[in-house]
Image (tube, rainbow, N blue to C red):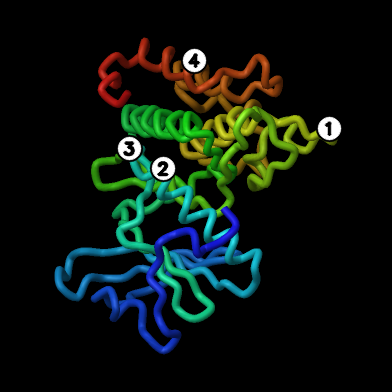
Amino acid sequence: MSSVEQISVIQLPKEVDVFHYHRMQYSSVLHQGQRSKILLARSKIIPDKKFAVKQIPLLSDEDRDRFSREMWLMKLASDIRGVVTLLSRPVFCGPTGYLIMPFYDKRDLLSQTGKLSHDNWMKVFVRAAVSLRSLHKKNIYHQNLRPENILLNTRDVAFISDFGAACLLSEGCDKVDTWTAAPGFRGPGADKEDGQLCPFQLDTYSLAVSMWQVLSGLCPVKNKPLDHLDNIPPQYAALLRNLLLPDPDMRWTLDKFLTVALELHPDLSCFL
């Protein structure tokens, strides 16, 4: 996607207040990222209704292309369960872009570290894996899966968010030559020089590290996940061990993980 003109957007004059336009009231900053902010807004019509608004400065052609790609991929993934969707057309207001999304009361997985029961942890893991597999079937790879980008509603249903680094794999290709996932979530071999990387395998590794972090309470930048599985229930440690193998040819795929997970928990088959 190279041009925002190819996507239906709302174009507002820079003096117009985006929140007033959408009958919302700005509340606070939920998250400050390197390139964007996530803002909390409340409906002026339904006081208890909340929204998450991603605010992205568009100061260069690169910024605009990244924003264009993000909203295009979110639209492409809008029919997948467990993926954060847009509640409105994207908004351009002066040199700033806005994405209006649902607000999830339990915030992100990182905030739930140590709070999820093992059964709920498994439900979150399976649901996130099913959603990620559906993204991969559309040739979308996320490239930034970590606990901060997996959101939970009040029923502990997981939603994959933040498509700012996501890309669409070119037709006929199964490898990429660069990988931008965060340190600790990048995966063994992600920095090799020949650049033959399977993005779907690396996404799967990032998801496994995310779930390991929530279960263990440890930071993957400071600790190697495979060295710290002792304090995790054996049945879950076995799943993670196979998803975290350094050799990508030996590492489980999402299909293999889901097959084994459903053998352990047949009641989760309803999530497929």
Q: Secondary structure at mark 1?
A: loop
Label 2 belongs to which residue?
A: 77
Q: Is residue 212 left or right of residue 250?
A: left
Snapshot quadrant of residue 267: top left
Circles 2, 4 touching at the beta carbon (< 8 Å): no
Q: Which amino acid, mark 3? A: Arg
Circles 3, 2 touching at the beta carbon (< 8 Å): no
The numbered mark at residue 213 is none
Q: CA distance from mark 3 to mark 2?
A: 9 Å
Q: Nearer the viewer, residue 30 or 256?
A: 256
Q: Is residue 45 left or right of residue 30?
A: left
Q: Residue at x 22, y 71 (%)?
A: 43
Mark 2 and mark 4 lie on one chain; the one further toward the N terminus is 2
Counting other residues with Cα less than 10 Å from the Cα at mark 2, is it few (<14), some (14-19), or many (20 or more)? some
Label 3 belongs to which residue?
A: 81
Q: Residue at x 32, y 23 (%)?
A: 272
Q: Secondary structure at mark 3?
A: loop
The numbered mark at residue 256 is 4
Residue positioned most to the right: 193
Q: Nearer the viewer, residue 133 or 149?
A: 133
The numbered mark at residue 194 is 1
Mark 4 and mark 3 lie on one chain; the one further toward the N terminus is 3
For marks 4 and 1, give the one nearer the viewer.
Answer: 1
Q: CA distance from mark 4 to mark 1?
A: 27 Å
Q: Horizontal and vertical percent for residue 91?
A: 41, 70
For marks 1 and 2, give the one nearer the viewer.
Answer: 2
Q: Which amino acid, mark 1? A: Asp
Snapshot quadrant of residue 158: top left
Counting other residues with Cα less than 10 Å from the Cα at mark 1, is it few (<14), some (14-19), or many (20 or more)? few
Height in image: 264 above or below 223? above
Q: Which amino acid, mark 4? A: Lys
